[in-house]
Image: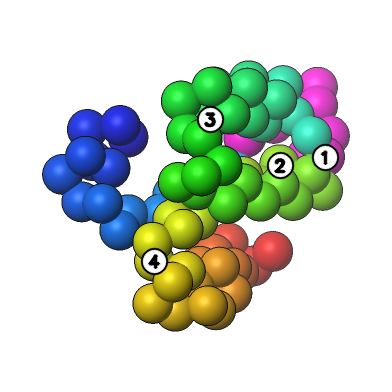
């Protein structure tokens, strides 16, 4: 992801931390690990960090992209909702 961001400075990212068989989909272990890693490598000055714990969804919305489209995060959410039926 870091390499992609360096090659494409307007990139945003989103992912869902899949649940293990014994887990509920709310705030999964994978989600918690992803969140920790993302907060370490992607700083708030460059990305807006958006968490949707009930779906274990984490979005990194590029601040530069938000400058050009202040609804960029909504566009990402709509795309994810269409694909994953959140």
Q: Specify whether residue 36 is painted magenta.
A: no
Pick out the residue farthest to the front.
Answer: 45
**Residue 3's image quarter?**
top left
Mark 4 against mark 3, which lies toward the viewer?
A: 4
Quarter of the C terminus within the rendering: bottom right
**Residue 23's image quarter?**
top right
Q: Are marks 4 and 2 in contact (CB under 8 Å)?
A: no
Residue closer to the observer: 85 or 33: 33
Q: Are marks 2 and 3 in contact (CB under 8 Å)?
A: no
Quarter of the N terminus within the rendering: top left
Residue linked to disc 1: 26
Q: Point out the stretch of residues depicted in magenta.
A: 17-26
- N-term-proximal mark, 4 vs 2: 2
Q: Specify whether residue 23 is painted magenta.
A: yes
> Separation of disc 4 and disc 3 at Cα?
18 Å
In the image, taking residue 81 as reference, residue 20 lies left or right, namely right
- N-term-proximal mark, 1 vs 2: 1
> Separation of disc 2 and disc 3 at Cα?
14 Å
Residue at disc 2, secondary structure: loop
Residue closer to the observer: 79 or 61: 61
Residue shown at 71% from the left, 42% from the top: 56
The answer to whether residue 10 of the structure is visible from this angle is: yes
Using the image, determine if residue 46 lies above or below residue 65.
Answer: above
Residue linked to disc 3: 38
- Residue 8 is situated, as x and y percent measured from the top left of the image, at 20, 51
Residue linked to disc 4: 65
Q: Are marks 1 and 2 in contact (CB under 8 Å)?
A: yes
- N-term-proximal mark, 1 vs 4: 1
Using the image, determine if residue 38 lies above or below residue 77.
Answer: above
């Amino acid at each position: 992801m870091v390499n992609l961001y360096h090659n494409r400075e307007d990139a945003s990212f989103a992912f869902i931390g899949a649940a293990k068989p014994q887990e509920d989909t709310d705030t999964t272990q994978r989600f918690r690990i992803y969140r920790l890693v993302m907060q370490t490598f992607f700083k708030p000055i460059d990305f807006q960090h958006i968490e949707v714990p009930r779906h274990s969804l984490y979005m990194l919305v590029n601040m530069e992209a938000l400058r050009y489209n202040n609804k960029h995060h909504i566009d990402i959410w709509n795309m994810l909702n269409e694909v994953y039926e959140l």
